Amino acid sequence: MTAPAATAAQTASALARARRRSSVARFWRSYRTHRAGLFGLCALAVIALVALAAPLLAGSDVQSVTNAPGAALESPSAEFPLGTDQFGRSLLGLLVWGARISLTVGLMAAALSVAIGTLVGIVAGHFGGWFSTLIMRITDWFLVMPTLVLAIVLATVMSRSVWTVILAIGVTTWPTTARLVRAQTLAVESRPYIERATALGGGHGHIMTRHVLPNVMPLVLAQTTLGISYAILTEATLAFLGLGDPDVVSWGGMLQDAREAGAVSSGHWWYLAPPGIAIALVALAFTLCGRAVESVLNPKLGVSNR
């Protein structure tokens, strides 16, 4: 590459980086005007830090049944602020460790769901014809089927592990994203610059990855943040039904253990309330963040969602 060409390439790269930084700055300036979105973001930051620092805050042996430091089902005290479970383990320590699994499952399941939905939506919207019709009919079949029932079936027939839960949630919750992305793809491909790119020899892959995908990414981002809360709730439901990984601690698994220990009938509220509140708080925080992102990317929604 000659010196002028190299200089031009560096200049173009610098301009692209400057545009990206400018876009991020504009996004943040608009996002921070949404008080609910800021509350959700701060709550998620705190919960994420607690989950990452779980070995330091709760210790690595808090999940051990044989080395439990307390008596079974102790009420909250100075030693155990949230009480103990039926094995004498600290519920506060279990709650901290459970944040890791719940957040991991929520993030990865939502990412898998959005990835499948984005791929299906872009392909269906780009090619059209009978191929698009066939894909959309399959999508409609998944859409009308009860998502939780499908997830339960997959979690039942496969081995009980965290990856099974992630796969069960991811492959059953993508149709909504696929429908939204297909509609956005059709809108993007009706624009004149797509015709010019095709006339200049741009192939299907070039059109979909260089022109369509960047334009649907804002929608995908908003859908991801909204999907994480649903994935966390679904993981908690599967764990509560006994379909989660028995070797790890999650908030849904804590609720299932509380049910088996008879916490409802015996009035041990400290066993039920903390994981339930944690699930509700994280789901609410992700929903608030998703609504704020959606308002930023679609200014027409800004007034109603602030």
Image: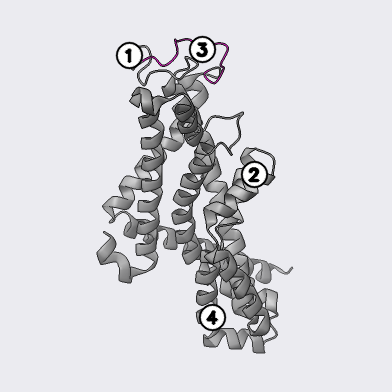
Q: Position of residue 153 (x, y in %)?
A: 62, 50
Q: Residue at x 60, y 44 (%)?
A: 165
Q: Residue at x 53, y 71 (%)?
A: 179
Say which of marks 2 and 1 sits in front: 2
Q: Which mark is residue 68?
A: 3
Residues in magenta?
Answer: 62-74
Q: Position of residue 292 (x, y in %)?
A: 35, 57
Say which of marks 2 and 3 sits in front: 2
* Residue 270 visible in image: no
State the image quarter where residue 302 is shown.
Answer: bottom left
Amino acid found under the numbered disc labelled 2: Thr
Counting residues from the start of the chain, the first of labels 4 and 1 encountered is 1
Which residue occupies the foreground of this view, 81 or 190?
81
Secondary structure beneath label 1: loop
**Which image quadrant: the C terminus?**
bottom left
Q: Which residue is mark 1?
A: 77
Q: Residue at x 67, y 87 (%)?
A: 200
For the residues marked 2 and 1, what is the alpha-carbon distance in whole angstroms? 39 Å
Secondary structure beneath label 4: helix
Question: Alpha-carbon neighbours of circle 3 within 10 Å: few (<14), some, or many (≥20)?
Answer: some
Counting residues from the start of the chain, the first of labels 2 and 3 encountered is 3
Are the two marked residues, 3 and 1, in contact with CB atoms closer than 8 angstroms?
Answer: no
Amino acid found under the numbered disc labelled 3: Ala
**Which image quadrant: the N terminus?**
bottom right
